[in-house]
Image (tube, rainbow, N blue to C red):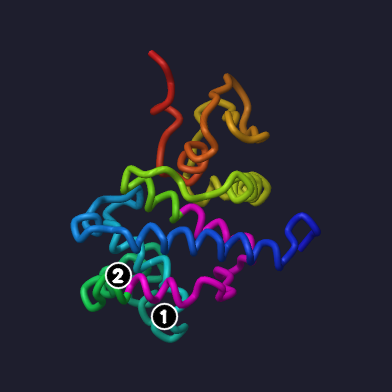
Amino acid sequence: MSDEHDTDHVSALTAMQRQATVAVLDGLSPSDWDRPTPCEGWTVAHLVAHMSMSFRVGMPKLVFTMIRERGNFDRAADRLARDDVARMDHADLVAALRNNISTAWSPPRGDLVDALCHDVVHGLDLTEGLGRPTTATAEQLDLVLRTMRTKNRMDYFGADLAGHALQASDLDFRIGHGDTLVLPATTIVLVLTGRGSVHDHLGG
């Protein structure tokens, strides 16, 4: 990990995002938990269950669920989130995240920066679903966007820029080639992670 991605600093940024997420969750009404999010088929409750999955679900259970879902991680994550929502109340879901604000974690074949991306992107899912301003800082968003560009994460999410370049209106960031669309950094993150389409932002 380079100086730009200093381990301690990335961990601090991740903890900051989790703390901000918990602060939002602490103020939710019962009906807020049933709101849909940009994660297809997931309510806020499903999303929060997923965000703490890595701290609660051991490898044996994850492997077993993956086998049940024929090796498809997305389906396994969906099953685990739905099972957790059915058996855990909202306070327990928040506590699972609160108790792991500073817990180091890296996704399979990933690193601490990927873990930060996970928390920031799902933090956006949360605030978008609730219709609230993002909790992510400019620095966090910048690191997420640059990670997605250098690691080519767009392929994983199936994002298609449709012959356009996306330029952040609030950060020094640009990706793609072609006619330029100027969008907020949060919107670009959502497009690059398949939660929105370039076509949603074309005029005319």
- Image coordinates for residue 139, horizontal then vertical, percent: 64, 48
Q: Compare marks 2 and 1 and give the one earlier in the sequence.
A: 1
Q: What residue type is labelled 1?
A: Arg
User: Can you say whether 89 is above or below 74 in the image?
Assistant: below
Q: Mark 2 points at which residue?
A: 79
Magenta residues, start to end: 93-121
User: Can you say whether 128 is above or below 182 in the image?
Assistant: below
Are there few (<14), some (14-19), or many (20+) residues within 10 Å of tag 2? some
| Quadrant in which the C terminus appears | top left
Is 18 placed left or right of 96 in the picture?
A: right
Residue lying farthest right?
3
Please indicate, yes or no, whether residue 115 appears anywhere in the rendered image.
no
Residue at image coords 41%, 38%: 196
The label on residue 41 is: none
Residue at image coords 57%, 19%: 179
The label on residue 56 is: 1
Q: Nearer the viewer, residue 1 or 12?
A: 12
Q: Are marks 2 and 1 in contact (CB under 8 Å)?
A: no
